[in-house]
Image (cartoon, rainbow, N blue to C red):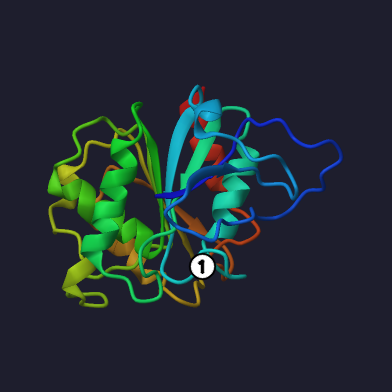
Amino acid sequence: MGVILVSRATLVPGTPASPYPTWPQKVGQRQSYDLRANATLHDEETTLDSQPVLFIQGAGMMHDPEGSGRLAAYLARELSADCRVIAPEMPDADNPHYQPWRDRIEQELQAIDEEAILIGHSLGGSALLKYLAEGSYRKAVPGLFLVSVPNWGSDGWAYEEFAAPNDVGSRLLASRIFLYHSRNDPEVPFAHLGYYQERLPMATARPVEGSEHSFVEGLPILLDDIKSLLR
């Protein structure tokens, strides 16, 4: 089903830090991997007492140098005292389609008993928004965090498969929504942020200086906003 980045784990003594986890070879495995190299492998049940955070990757291979896995690993490491970050590898990420991504999101959410914080990076944010707008998921969402998300509407990249409905803002159960976008994002133009500001007027927008899309070195303002919900 996916990868769980362990938040609370017993490490093998002396294991060095690593910027991202060792990803399992089989997507079907649902096992926990610590973020540090050579750490012991743990069962999912060891992390069930912490706040779940579901992270949905962008398109492309998650573990590539510019893939979403670097941001997921950063969040899991920095939130380790309070959260478990669940970061599934999405189906056919190099040639993504909404239905299998929607089904994977639903599958992951059904496996989480508590209210989950949701984070979507790039295309993953688009898929999360469209899924939540369908209304089948009825649990409250403490926070929805959207990073570098494209506008797939007619005034953006005009690709209906991943476009959220125009009234998406009125359909969401999220209590807090945050938007992040680099002013010089090399992949998704900064103007796409304005689309979501218009359709999600309740959201807090965080324009980010620089030219990041994947935020492989981390995104401190995102981290601060997540921590603000945990207080």
The reply, left or right, for residue 112 in relation to residue 152 is right
Q: Quadrant of residue 143 in the image?
A: top left
Q: Is residue 220 visible?
A: no
Indicate whether 13 appears above or below 57. Answer: above
Q: Nearer the viewer, residue 28 or 129?
A: 28
For the point 25% across and 70% down, which residue is it? 152
For the point 50% across and 77% down, which residue is it? 186
* Location of residue 212 in the rendering, given as x and y in whole percent from the top left corner: 56, 67
Indicate whether 182 appears above or below 32. Answer: below
Q: Nearer the viewer, residue 32 or 200?
A: 32
Element under label 1?
loop
* Location of residue 131 in the rendering, given as x and y in whole percent from the top left corner: 22, 51
Tally of numbered discs: 1
* Location of residue 215 in the rendering, given as x and y in whole percent from the top left corner: 57, 61
The reply, left or right, for residue 9 in relation to residue 209 is right
Question: How many other residues sit within 10 Å of disc 1, few (<14), some (14-19) or many (≥20)?
Answer: many
Indicate whether 138 appears above or below 134. Answer: above
Residue farthest to the right?
14
Q: Is residue 128 visible?
A: yes
* Location of residue 43 in the rendering, given as x and y in whole percent from the top left corner: 55, 34
The reply, left or right, for residue 166 in relation to residue 191 is left
Q: Nearer the viewer, residue 89 or 208?
A: 89
For the point 51% across and 64% down, which residue is it? 62
Residue to which mark 1 is pinned: 213
Indicate whether 228 appears above or below 169. Answer: above
For the point 15% across and 44% down, which residue is it? 171
Q: Amino acid at mark 1?
A: His
The reply, left or right, for residue 188 in relation to residue 71 is left
